[in-house]
Image (cartoon, rainbow, N blue to C red):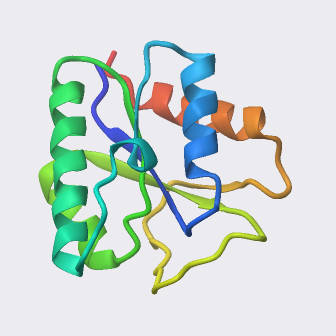
């Protein structure tokens, strides 16, 4: 059993989905919830919060059934990440890439457990880093 969801957060274009796909290739047991695959189209901040809430609830449900879960979703504000923490046990990993961009405001989490540099490190290396963190979260 695992005791936390690993949530990849970062600016748009920072490599969250790419790392998620690589994780899925490296370990089929990991359930990857990718915001790009699940996403509704937001009309407001309230819509966005509802989407993150839905993703967090789904992740929590899958985790409670004993499956490892990685979420690749932006969650750009501290308020959104705090709400996610209320809904499921979670650790945040920050993704970065030099050419990533953001249409709105993105506030980097101060409580992230790692930073993935998708400009300087190869994708498999970053995916393995996430998996090693994830396996450390496994209950013995």
With 51 as the anchor, is 115 left or right in this view?
right
Rendered view: 112 above or below 62: below
**x%, y% of residue 86?**
14, 58
Which quadrant of the rendered structure holds the N terminus? top left
Mark yes or no: residue 132 visible: no
Describe residue 56's horizontal placement relative to residue 30 as left or right: left
Q: Residue at x 24, y 17 (%)?
A: 66
- Residue placed farthest to the bottom in the image? 105
Query: Is residue 59 rendered to the left or right of residue 57?
Result: right
Q: Nearer the viewer, residue 69 or 39?
A: 39
Q: Residue at x 17, y 18 (%)?
A: 65
What percent of the width, then of the height, locates residue 97? 73, 64
The residue shown at (16%, 25%) is 64
Going 45% across and 71% down the picture, which residue do you hit?
Answer: 109
Task: Please provide percent x and percent y for residue 76.
Answer: 41, 73
Give whichever of 96, 112 is nearer the camera.
96
- Up-down: is 28 above or below 119? above
């Amino acid at each position: 059993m695992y005791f936390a969801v690993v949530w990849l957060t970062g600016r748009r274009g920072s490599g969250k989905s790419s790392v998620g796909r690589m994780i899925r290739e490296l370990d089929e047991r990991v359930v990857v919830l990718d915001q790009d695959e699940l996403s509704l189209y937001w009309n407001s901040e309230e819509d966005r919060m509802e989407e993150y809430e839905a993703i967090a609830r789904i992740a929590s449900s899958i985790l409670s059934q004993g499956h490892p879960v990685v979420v690749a979703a932006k969650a750009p504000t501290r308020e959104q990440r705090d709400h996610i923490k209320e809904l499921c046990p979670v650790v945040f990993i920050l993704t970065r890439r030099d050419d990533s961009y953001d249409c709105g405001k993105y506030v980097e989490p101060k409580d992230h457990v790692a930073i993935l540099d998708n400009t300087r490190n190869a994708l498999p290396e970053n995916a393995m880093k996430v998996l090693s963190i994830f396996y450390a979260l496994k209950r013995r």
